[in-house]
Amino acid sequence: AFVVMFGFGWLVYITIIRRVIDKELFTSLLATFGLAILLQQALNLIFGSDVQSAESGFDTRFLFGGMVTIAEIKFVALIVAVALSACVVIFMKRSRMGQAIRATAQDARAARVLGINTDRVYAFTFALNAAICGAAGVLIAMIWVIQPYFGVVYSIRSFVIVTVAGLGNLVAVIVTALGLGAAEQFSAFIFGAEFQVASVVCMLVAVLIWRQIQQARKRQVVE
């Protein structure tokens, strides 16, 4: 899945993203959301809208005399996620492409002056993101049920995490993701599983309001 999605991400960048990357942000958002809707409908036609599950082949482990049950696939998913995160961090800090990605993210124009092929960097970054999403999708499919429209919920979760943690801070992203997961489980326990997704949307609204208040305070300090 990692290799296939890497190639798919590179193809999407060449055919779609490259044409809108230098335009307004709203144009890029429309292009990516349009692609997401297209993929959702394609998957809906192929697999249907009913939820489906994948057989992982792992058993359930009983701990503390059978009082606690934990699926072994969740341990495997945790190990894979930690290993993949560590590889990405090492790649970004030690490899030349990782340094080029960081330089381009900070100042694309200066990176071009220094001889960095920013178009290749953008393509590689988009493909790498697609590959990571592909690996995460495989783990999610083995742990939970899936259907073509589940991506919207994970997009909202990702937006909440990035908004709270900020860009370029992996430790804050991990801590925020764990906190979001704990908050979801707590809300599902208190209000019921049907309100778990609604709690994510409420968190998104709260984070946006909090960010707006922060920006207003910063503007007052500057003035």
Image (cartoon, rainbow, N blue to C red):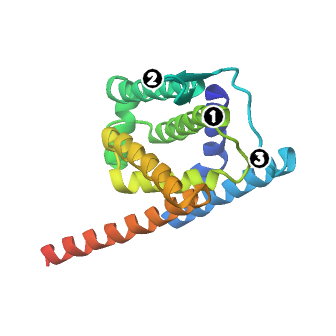
Nearer to the camera, 106 or 87: 87
- Left or right relative to 89: residue 213: left
| Residue under pointer 3 | 51
Kind of residue sitting beneath label 3: Val
Residue 113 can be seen in this image: no
- Residue of label 2: 83
Q: Nearer the viewer, residue 48 or 40?
A: 48
Image depth: mark 2 or mark 3 in front: 3
| Real-space CA distance between mark 3 and mark 1, rounded to the nearest whole angstrom | 13 Å
Q: Is residue 136 above or below residue 64?
A: below
Is the C terminus in the top left, top right, bottom left or bottom right quadrant?
Answer: bottom left
Residue at label 1? 143
Which quadrant of the view contains residue 95? top left
Q: Secondary structure at mark 1?
A: helix
Which quadrant would residue 110 be assigned to in this image?
A: top left
Residue at position x 50%, y 61% from top? 199
Q: Residue at x 32, y 68 (%)?
A: 210
In this rendering, the answer to whether 78 lies above or below 104 is above
Q: Give how far across and how far down residue 10 sits, in percent.
A: 61, 37
Callout 2 environment at 10 Å: few (<14), some (14 to 19), or many (20+)?
few
Identify the amino acid type marked 1: Ile
Q: Which of the marked residues, 2 or 3, is nearer the chain's N terminus?
A: 3
